[in-house]
Image: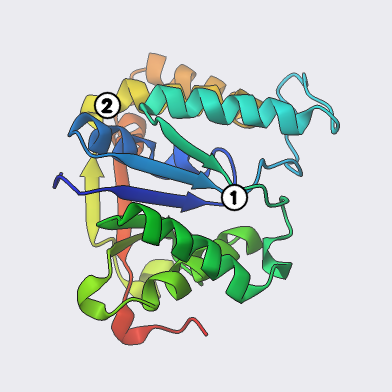
Amino acid sequence: MEKERHVLVVFPHPDDEAFGVSGTIASHIKNGTPVTYACLTLGEMGRNLGNPPFATRESLPKVRKAELEAAAKAMGITDLRMMGYRDKTLEFENDQALANMVFGLIEELNPSLVITFYPGYSVHPDHEATGRAVVRAVRRLPIEKRPKLHCVAFSKGHEAEIGPADIVHDVSDVWEQKFGALKAHISQTAWMLADMEKQISDDNPDLLAHWKKERFWTYDWDNDKVL
């Protein structure tokens, strides 16, 4: 993995980072690259309350904040930004204001790489709004000064439109950090981890191989469709 000047990760919810990019984050930190994670909400409208439930609607924001901090620690992140937006409302935020927020982070940090969701291919309205805001912010810079923009995509049939992933990171050597990040978000991942641990104990190499690969698409500026 190439050493970067600074990596800025922008996602809307606690646990968005854990599933698809926590190994990549841990790898960058292991390489000596500073990483800033800007998490826009606390995921307070999440449907999962633990399995068995241990959170309530009232306590979930505090629970998820603590889980996010624990996940950041597992990955080695020391610059965690909680941006204070409300879960499931980002699609209703002013587009310009969201882009201004991201642009402010870019001006402050001068990242050489930004990681976010791919607009149009990330399913959840909050994911889409976040990805669009990042694209709008990066687009303000002259082409030669733009950081690389690596995006996570997982909508059904996305590869038919944007092709296979441009970048695949093998994060086997930081698997413990990735699993630690997943486990930190236990209110949201308990159901999945129980099944994963069983399959791992049953020696399912295909499952481990899947989780130890993280896939990214470089944003296609030539076919930029974000308005």
Q: Amino acid at mark 2?
A: Val
Q: Amino acid at mark 1?
A: Leu
Q: Nearer the viewer, residue 66 or 206?
A: 66
Q: Which secondary structure lies at badge 2?
A: helix
Residue at 51 percent of width and 51 percent of height: 11
Q: Which secondary structure lies at badge 1?
A: loop
Q: Is residue 33 visible?
A: yes
226 versus 167 height, above or below: below
Question: Which residue is label 1 attached to?
Answer: 40
Q: Using a 10 Å C-alpha cutoff, classify the residue at mark 1 as few (fewer than 14 neighbours), some (14 to 19) or many (20 or more).
A: many
Q: CA distance from mark 1 to mark 2?
A: 25 Å
In x, y percent, where is residue 118? 44, 65
> What color scheme is it?
rainbow
In x, y percent, where is residue 190? 61, 24
Q: Nearer the viewer, mark 1 or mark 2?
A: 1
Q: Nearer the viewer, residue 223 or 227?
A: 227
Q: Is residue 86 left or right of residue 123?
A: right
> Which numbered dot is residue 192?
none
Q: Is residue 211 left or right of residue 148?
A: right
